[in-house]
């Protein structure tokens, strides 16, 4: 254990706290058991270490462990927790719990047997923490870490920090907000960079290698994370790769499940499940109209890739600007505000606001009969009447 403690101290000491993800300040850290899910590469490890560096009393004894550490080849997590509490341990942070076979059972036992120990664990976004070997639904408070927003990308790349604005702010106060932003940065230029390489924090390690790293990350999500968290065999994982490429070739994708099932050589239930896994992995986003809903076995009406960076690498930049605009809009709102397909406009948000997304030449024609309807336009800096710049929706988190 001494080696683990020293590793933990070194990591916490060396973590940069200059840039912090939005979720760090939204989590109620007082809970005894916290789960943080998110896509591979979204910054979960850094968030854990920053929590220890910034929010845990320096006098408290804390321990960060990664579940792929060789220590766990012949030691149990439960036993580690017991030994740690004996020496006064108060905070146990467990990274990538999906890489540990009996994670749910042992975390349940840790929670029940060591009430003075606070536990925070991260996992792949694919993992259903409430359907493990032991039910954690009455114990764990779960949070999801999204990819970087445009606002966060600007903070990380430009070192310019802005407030988060609510959707209500954006639709009612955009004329007040926009001058504050324009006074510090040209948001259209930042937006153009963001859609290429701004969704994942590792762009800071080299923008020239970003596309290669993102493709590698996609492969790891499917080959490693899905294998570790689902019952699919390797043959079906290969088919899921093919399915993702098929979706990418014609997004926004309107699926014909029967034809797609035949093309993928997958049964309908397996295909629907595969789409569900791709969405949980934050590789795609499925949308339906508000009247239909989207359950686990429901056929989606339209499918987008999760973010514009994925769109770039999976289509080799052979995409339409209209698809990029809609993908960006959907990504920035997903998980923040309820999002559905609109009947007349492109999107219905919070079952109240209608948004039609387009370029500078987009007209009011499709939304003129709707209440609470707005045009969202690319390549404009200012709001006019019910027209809002697309980039401003990148400041929602």
Image (spheres, rainbow, N blue to C red):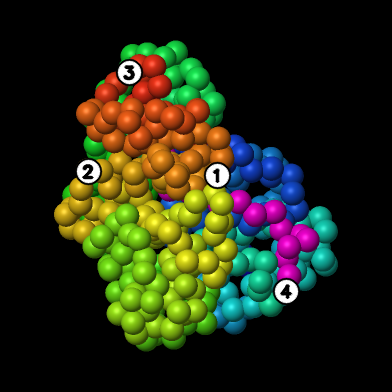
Specify the label residue 134 is tagged with: 4
Label pair 2/3, CB-CB below 8 angstroms: no
Mark carried by residue 382: 3
Mark nearest the camera among 3 and 4 is 3
Give, as a single range, the part of the protein colored magenta: 135-149
Is 390 placed above or below 278 here?
above
Q: Where does the image place residue 391, in percent across and percent down from the top left?
A: 34, 31
- The dominant secondary structure in magenta is loop
Mark positioned earlier in the residue sequence (1 or 2)? 2
Residue 148 sits inside the magenta stretch:
yes
User: How far apart are the alpha carbons under marks 2 and 4?
Assistant: 46 Å
Element type at mark 2: helix
Q: Which residue bears the numbered disc 2?
A: 321
Q: Estimate the spatial distance between the alpha carbons at disc 2 and disc 3, rounded to whole Å.
A: 20 Å
Marks 1/4 in contact by CB < 8 Å: the verdict is: no
Residue 194, located in which quarter of the rendered image? top left
Please identify the quarter of the rendering in which residue 235 is found.
bottom left
In the image, taking residue 208 as reference, residue 357 lies left or right, namely: right
Which tag is nearer the camera, tag 2 or tag 4? 2
Mark 3–mark 4 distance (CA, rounded to whole Å): 52 Å
Disc with the residue nearer the chain's start (3 vs 4): 4
* Percent coordinates x, y for residue 218 in the rendering: 34, 65
């Amino acid at each position: 254990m001494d080696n683990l403690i020293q590793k933990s101290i070194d990591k916490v000491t060396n973590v940069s706290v200059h840039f912090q993800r939005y979720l760090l300040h939204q989590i109620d850290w007082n809970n005894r058991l916290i789960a943080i899910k998110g896509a591979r590469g979204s910054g979960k490890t850094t968030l854990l270490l920053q929590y220890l560096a910034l929010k845990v009393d320096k006098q408290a004894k804390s321990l960060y462990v990664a579940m792929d550490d060789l220590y766990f080849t012949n030691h149990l997590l439960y036993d580690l927790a017991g030994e740690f509490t004996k020496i006064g341990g108060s905070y146990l942070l467990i990274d990538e719990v999906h890489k540990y076979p009996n994670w749910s059972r042992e975390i349940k036992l840790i929670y029940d047997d060591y009430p003075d120990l606070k536990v925070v664990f991260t996992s792949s976004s694919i993992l259903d923490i409430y359907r493990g070997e032991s039910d954690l639904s009455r114990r764990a408070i779960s949070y999801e870490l999204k990819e970087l927003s445009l606002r966060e990308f600007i903070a990380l790349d430009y070192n310019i920090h802005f407030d988060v604005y609510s959707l209500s702010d954006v639709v009612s106060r955009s004329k007040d907000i926009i001058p504050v932003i324009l006074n510090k940065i040209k948001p259209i230029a930042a937006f153009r960079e963001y859609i290429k390489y701004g969704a994942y924090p590792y762009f800071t390690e080299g923008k020239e290698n970003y596309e290669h790293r993102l493709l590698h990350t996609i492969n790891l999500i499917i080959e490693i994370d899905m294998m570790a968290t689902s019952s699919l065999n390797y043959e079906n994982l290969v088919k899921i790769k093919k399915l993702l490429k098929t979706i990418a070739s014609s997004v926004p994708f309107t699926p014909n499940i029967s034809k797609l099932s035949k093309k993928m050589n997958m049964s309908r239930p397996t295909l629907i499940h595969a789409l569900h896994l791709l969405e949980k992995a934050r590789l795609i986003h499925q949308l339906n109209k508000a009247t239909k809903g989207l359950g686990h076995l429901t056929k989606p009406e339209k499918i987008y890739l999760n973010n514009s960076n994925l769109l770039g690498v999976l289509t080799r930049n052979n995409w339409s600007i209209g698809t990029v605009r809609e993908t960006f809009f959907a990504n920035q709102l997903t998980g923040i505000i309820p999002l559905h397909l609109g009947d007349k406009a492109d999107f219905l948000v919070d079952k109240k606001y209608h948004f039609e997304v387009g370029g500078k030449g987009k007209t009011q024609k499709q939304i003129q009969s709707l209440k609470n309807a707005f045009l969202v336009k690319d390549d404009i800096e200012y709001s006019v009447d019910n027209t809002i710049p697309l980039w401003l929706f990148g400041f929602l988190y």
